[in-house]
Amino acid sequence: MWHYWDWLGIDLIVDAAVLEQIFRRALKMRQKLFGVEHPDILPSLNHLAFLLKKKGDYKSAKQFYRLALKISQQVLGEEHADTATFLNHLALVLQGLGTYEEAEPLYRQALKIRENVLGVTHSLTLQTFNHLALLLQDKGDYEEAEQLYRKTLSNCKGCEMATALNNLALLFKNKGDSEGAKPLYQRALVIFEKVLGATHANTVTVRQNLELL
Protein backbone atom coordinates (compact mmCIF):
# COMPACT_ATOMS: atom_id res chain seq x y z
CA MET A 1 0.00 0.00 0.00
CA TRP A 2 1.15 3.55 -0.79
CA HIS A 3 0.69 6.90 0.85
CA TYR A 4 -0.40 9.37 -1.80
CA TRP A 5 -1.28 13.00 -1.18
CA ASP A 6 -3.98 14.27 -3.51
CA TRP A 7 -4.30 17.86 -4.74
CA LEU A 8 -6.28 18.80 -1.63
CA GLY A 9 -3.46 17.63 0.62
CA ILE A 10 -5.40 14.61 1.85
CA ASP A 11 -3.28 11.57 2.71
CA LEU A 12 -4.70 8.59 0.82
CA ILE A 13 -3.50 5.02 1.26
CA VAL A 14 -3.75 3.42 -2.17
CA ASP A 15 -2.53 0.17 -3.71
CA ALA A 16 0.27 1.00 -6.17
CA ALA A 17 -1.28 -1.08 -8.97
CA VAL A 18 -4.63 0.66 -8.52
CA LEU A 19 -2.94 4.05 -8.51
CA GLU A 20 -1.09 3.20 -11.73
CA GLN A 21 -4.37 2.27 -13.41
CA ILE A 22 -5.90 5.57 -12.28
CA PHE A 23 -2.95 7.56 -13.63
CA ARG A 24 -2.97 5.69 -16.95
CA ARG A 25 -6.72 6.28 -17.41
CA ALA A 26 -6.29 9.96 -16.52
CA LEU A 27 -3.52 10.28 -19.09
CA LYS A 28 -5.62 8.65 -21.83
CA MET A 29 -8.56 10.91 -21.01
CA ARG A 30 -6.42 14.05 -21.14
CA GLN A 31 -4.79 12.94 -24.39
CA LYS A 32 -8.22 12.35 -25.92
CA LEU A 33 -9.52 15.68 -24.66
CA PHE A 34 -6.51 17.93 -25.37
CA GLY A 35 -4.34 15.99 -27.83
CA VAL A 36 -1.18 13.94 -27.38
CA GLU A 37 1.20 16.90 -27.29
CA HIS A 38 -0.75 19.44 -25.24
CA PRO A 39 0.72 21.02 -22.08
CA ASP A 40 -2.35 19.99 -20.07
CA ILE A 41 -1.28 16.35 -20.27
CA LEU A 42 2.07 17.13 -18.60
CA PRO A 43 0.76 16.65 -15.01
CA SER A 44 -0.60 13.20 -15.90
CA LEU A 45 2.69 12.21 -17.55
CA ASN A 46 4.62 13.44 -14.53
CA HIS A 47 2.41 11.59 -12.01
CA LEU A 48 2.61 8.32 -13.93
CA ALA A 49 6.37 8.54 -14.52
CA PHE A 50 6.98 9.37 -10.85
CA LEU A 51 4.91 6.38 -9.71
CA LEU A 52 6.68 4.02 -12.11
CA LYS A 53 10.05 5.26 -10.88
CA LYS A 54 9.02 4.70 -7.26
CA LYS A 55 7.95 1.16 -8.20
CA GLY A 56 11.39 0.57 -9.71
CA ASP A 57 10.17 0.46 -13.32
CA TYR A 58 12.81 2.89 -14.55
CA LYS A 59 12.51 1.93 -18.22
CA SER A 60 8.80 2.80 -18.34
CA ALA A 61 9.37 5.96 -16.30
CA LYS A 62 12.04 7.00 -18.80
CA GLN A 63 9.55 6.65 -21.65
CA PHE A 64 7.00 8.97 -20.05
CA TYR A 65 9.56 11.52 -18.86
CA ARG A 66 11.00 11.68 -22.39
CA LEU A 67 7.54 12.41 -23.77
CA ALA A 68 6.91 15.05 -21.10
CA LEU A 69 10.25 16.69 -21.85
CA LYS A 70 9.56 16.73 -25.58
CA ILE A 71 6.16 18.38 -25.07
CA SER A 72 7.52 20.89 -22.56
CA GLN A 73 10.36 21.89 -24.89
CA GLN A 74 8.04 22.28 -27.86
CA VAL A 75 5.14 24.04 -26.15
CA LEU A 76 6.63 25.86 -23.15
CA GLY A 77 10.11 26.45 -24.51
CA GLU A 78 13.68 25.25 -24.01
CA GLU A 79 14.30 27.70 -21.15
CA HIS A 80 11.07 27.20 -19.19
CA ALA A 81 11.25 26.15 -15.54
CA ASP A 82 8.99 23.14 -16.23
CA THR A 83 11.37 22.02 -18.97
CA ALA A 84 14.17 22.07 -16.39
CA THR A 85 12.02 19.94 -14.08
CA PHE A 86 11.54 17.25 -16.72
CA LEU A 87 15.24 17.38 -17.63
CA ASN A 88 16.07 16.81 -13.97
CA HIS A 89 13.52 13.98 -13.57
CA LEU A 90 14.70 12.22 -16.72
CA ALA A 91 18.33 12.56 -15.62
CA LEU A 92 17.47 10.96 -12.27
CA VAL A 93 15.92 7.98 -14.05
CA LEU A 94 18.88 7.64 -16.41
CA GLN A 95 21.24 7.82 -13.44
CA GLY A 96 19.22 5.08 -11.78
CA LEU A 97 19.69 2.98 -14.91
CA GLY A 98 23.45 3.60 -14.75
CA THR A 99 23.59 5.63 -17.97
CA TYR A 100 25.65 8.44 -16.46
CA GLU A 101 26.93 9.81 -19.75
CA GLU A 102 23.37 10.42 -20.90
CA ALA A 103 22.19 11.81 -17.56
CA GLU A 104 25.02 14.30 -16.99
CA PRO A 105 24.25 16.74 -19.85
CA LEU A 106 20.58 16.74 -18.87
CA TYR A 107 21.48 17.74 -15.29
CA ARG A 108 23.76 20.48 -16.63
CA GLN A 109 21.03 21.79 -18.92
CA ALA A 110 18.48 21.74 -16.09
CA LEU A 111 20.94 23.50 -13.79
CA LYS A 112 21.61 26.25 -16.33
CA ILE A 113 17.88 26.90 -16.78
CA ARG A 114 17.17 26.90 -13.06
CA GLU A 115 20.04 29.24 -12.29
CA ASN A 116 18.84 31.66 -14.97
CA VAL A 117 15.11 31.43 -14.26
CA LEU A 118 14.89 30.68 -10.54
CA GLY A 119 18.22 31.89 -9.17
CA VAL A 120 21.09 30.12 -7.51
CA THR A 121 19.51 30.06 -4.03
CA HIS A 122 16.20 28.50 -5.10
CA SER A 123 15.55 25.06 -3.62
CA LEU A 124 15.11 23.46 -7.06
CA THR A 125 18.41 24.90 -8.26
CA LEU A 126 20.13 23.56 -5.15
CA GLN A 127 18.45 20.21 -5.75
CA THR A 128 20.02 19.98 -9.21
CA PHE A 129 23.42 21.03 -7.86
CA ASN A 130 23.16 18.11 -5.46
CA HIS A 131 21.97 15.61 -8.07
CA LEU A 132 24.77 16.52 -10.48
CA ALA A 133 27.34 16.36 -7.68
CA LEU A 134 26.13 12.88 -6.70
CA LEU A 135 26.42 11.70 -10.29
CA LEU A 136 29.95 13.09 -10.61
CA GLN A 137 30.84 11.49 -7.30
CA ASP A 138 29.57 8.12 -8.57
CA LYS A 139 31.73 8.60 -11.68
CA GLY A 140 34.77 9.31 -9.51
CA ASP A 141 35.03 12.98 -10.50
CA TYR A 142 35.55 14.07 -6.91
CA GLU A 143 37.04 17.48 -7.69
CA GLU A 144 34.03 18.92 -9.54
CA ALA A 145 31.60 17.13 -7.22
CA GLU A 146 33.23 18.82 -4.23
CA GLN A 147 33.02 22.20 -5.95
CA LEU A 148 29.30 21.72 -6.52
CA TYR A 149 28.68 20.62 -2.93
CA ARG A 150 30.53 23.68 -1.64
CA LYS A 151 28.59 25.95 -3.97
CA THR A 152 25.40 24.39 -2.61
CA LEU A 153 26.55 24.94 0.96
CA SER A 154 27.22 28.61 0.29
CA ASN A 155 23.64 29.12 -0.90
CA CYS A 156 21.48 26.97 1.37
CA LYS A 157 20.44 26.36 4.96
CA GLY A 158 18.47 23.92 7.07
CA CYS A 159 17.86 20.43 5.74
CA GLU A 160 19.28 21.32 2.33
CA MET A 161 22.54 22.24 4.02
CA ALA A 162 22.50 19.06 6.10
CA THR A 163 21.97 16.95 2.98
CA ALA A 164 24.86 18.65 1.19
CA LEU A 165 27.08 18.22 4.24
CA ASN A 166 26.24 14.51 4.43
CA ASN A 167 26.98 14.02 0.73
CA LEU A 168 30.22 15.96 0.93
CA ALA A 169 31.22 13.85 3.93
CA LEU A 170 30.54 10.72 1.89
CA LEU A 171 32.76 12.08 -0.85
CA PHE A 172 35.61 12.58 1.63
CA LYS A 173 35.05 9.09 2.99
CA ASN A 174 35.18 7.59 -0.50
CA LYS A 175 38.47 9.41 -1.04
CA GLY A 176 39.80 7.77 2.11
CA ASP A 177 39.73 10.98 4.16
CA SER A 178 37.75 9.94 7.23
CA GLU A 179 39.12 12.85 9.26
CA GLY A 180 37.76 15.29 6.70
CA ALA A 181 34.40 13.51 6.63
CA LYS A 182 33.83 13.41 10.40
CA PRO A 183 33.15 17.13 11.11
CA LEU A 184 30.86 17.31 8.05
CA TYR A 185 28.78 14.39 9.31
CA GLN A 186 28.71 15.98 12.75
CA ARG A 187 27.42 19.29 11.39
CA ALA A 188 24.78 17.48 9.30
CA LEU A 189 23.66 15.48 12.34
CA VAL A 190 23.24 18.58 14.50
CA ILE A 191 21.06 20.23 11.85
CA PHE A 192 18.88 17.18 11.22
CA GLU A 193 18.39 16.57 14.94
CA LYS A 194 17.36 20.18 15.46
CA VAL A 195 15.06 20.43 12.44
CA LEU A 196 13.69 16.91 12.02
CA GLY A 197 14.25 15.25 15.39
CA ALA A 198 16.47 12.43 16.62
CA THR A 199 14.36 9.59 15.21
CA HIS A 200 13.78 10.91 11.68
CA ALA A 201 15.12 8.68 8.89
CA ASN A 202 17.54 11.37 7.66
CA THR A 203 18.91 11.89 11.16
CA VAL A 204 19.32 8.15 11.70
CA THR A 205 21.13 7.78 8.36
CA VAL A 206 23.66 10.50 9.14
CA ARG A 207 24.20 9.11 12.64
CA GLN A 208 24.90 5.68 11.15
CA ASN A 209 27.25 7.19 8.57
CA LEU A 210 29.17 8.88 11.36
CA GLU A 211 29.34 5.69 13.41
CA LEU A 212 30.67 3.74 10.41
CA LEU A 213 33.69 6.02 9.90
Image (tube, grey):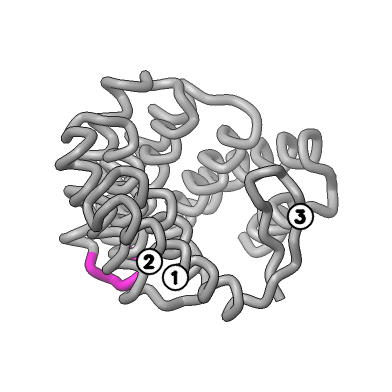
Residue 21 within the magenta-colored segment of the rendering: no
Q: Quadrant of the N terminus?
A: bottom right
199 horizontally vs 33: left or right: right
Question: Sequence-wise, which precedes: disc 3 or disc 2?
Answer: 3
Magenta-drawn segment: 95-99
Above or below: residue 95 compared with residue 178: below
Q: Amino acid at mark 1?
A: Arg
Q: Which residue is mark 2?
A: 28
Task: Using the image as rendered, state which of residue 93 and residue 79 is in the foreground.
Answer: 79
Please report contact status of discs 1 and 2: CB closer than 8 Å, yes or no. yes
Above or below: residue 47 compared with residue 56: above
> Which image quadrant for residue 113?
top left
Which residue in the rendered view is the most extreme toward the front?
A: 33
**Residue beneath the point at 73% across and 50% down:** 203
Mark 3 is surrounded, within 10 Å at the Cα level, by few (under 14), some (14 to 19) or many (20 or more) other residues, namely: few
Instruction: Tell me, yes or no, if residue 133 can be seen here.
Output: no
Q: Which residue is mark 3?
A: 11
Please report contact status of discs 3 and 2: CB closer than 8 Å, yes or no. no
31 horizontally vs 7: left or right: left
**Residue beneath the point at 84% across and 48% down:** 198
Real-space CA distance between mark 3 and mark 2, rounded to the nearest whole angstrom = 25 Å
Which residue in the rendered view is the most extreme toward the bottom?
A: 17
Q: Which residue is mark 1?
A: 24
Task: Using the image as rendered, state which of residue 147 and residue 101 is in the foreground.
Answer: 101
Q: Amino acid at mark 2?
A: Lys
159 horizontally vs 164: left or right: right
Mark 1 is surrounded, within 10 Å at the Cα level, by few (under 14), some (14 to 19) or many (20 or more) other residues, namely: some
Secondary structure of the residue carrying tag 2 is helix
Q: Amino acid at mark 3?
A: Asp
Q: Main secondary structure of the magenta part?
A: loop
